[in-house]
């Protein structure tokens, strides 16, 4: 689901509940899937998720980053 202003905000709990209900009633997707590849509801703990970061990567001259 893309936010119209490109601001990747997390919906508040009430909005997540409404979206999860819509998921079950009309098969809309949340962008989350279960281990079987089926659309899944918004996680309850998403407010506590933190991005996983690491230090900057230095590449040797002449090596591609991928």
Image (spheres, rainbow, N blue to C red):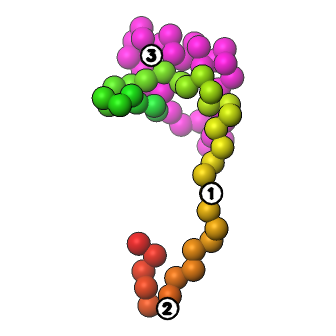
Q: Secondary structure at mark 1?
A: loop
The foreground one among 50 and 8 is 50
| Rendered image quadrant of residue 10 | top right
Residue wearing tag 1: 53
Residue 48 location, x and y as percent? 68, 34
Q: Which residues are magenta?
A: 1-30
The tag on residue 23 is 3
- Disc nearest the viewer among 3 and 2: 2
The tag on residue 24 is none
Q: CA distance from mark 3 to mark 2?
A: 49 Å
Residue wearing tag 2: 61
- Disc nearest the viewer among 1 and 3: 1
The foreground one among 44 and 21 is 44
Q: Secondary structure at mark 3?
A: helix
Check residue 22 for magenta coloring: yes
Above or below 40: residue 17: above
Check residue 43 for magenta coloring: no
The foreground one among 37 and 9 is 37
């Amino acid at each position: 689901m893309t936010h119209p202003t490109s601001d990747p905000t997390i919906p508040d709990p009430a909005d997540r509940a409404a979206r999860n209900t819509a998921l079950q009633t009309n098969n809309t997707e949340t962008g989350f899937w279960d281990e079987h590849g089926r659309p899944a509801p918004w996680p309850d703990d998403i407010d506590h998720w933190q991005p996983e970061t690491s230090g900057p990567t230095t590449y040797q001259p002449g090596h591609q980053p991928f």
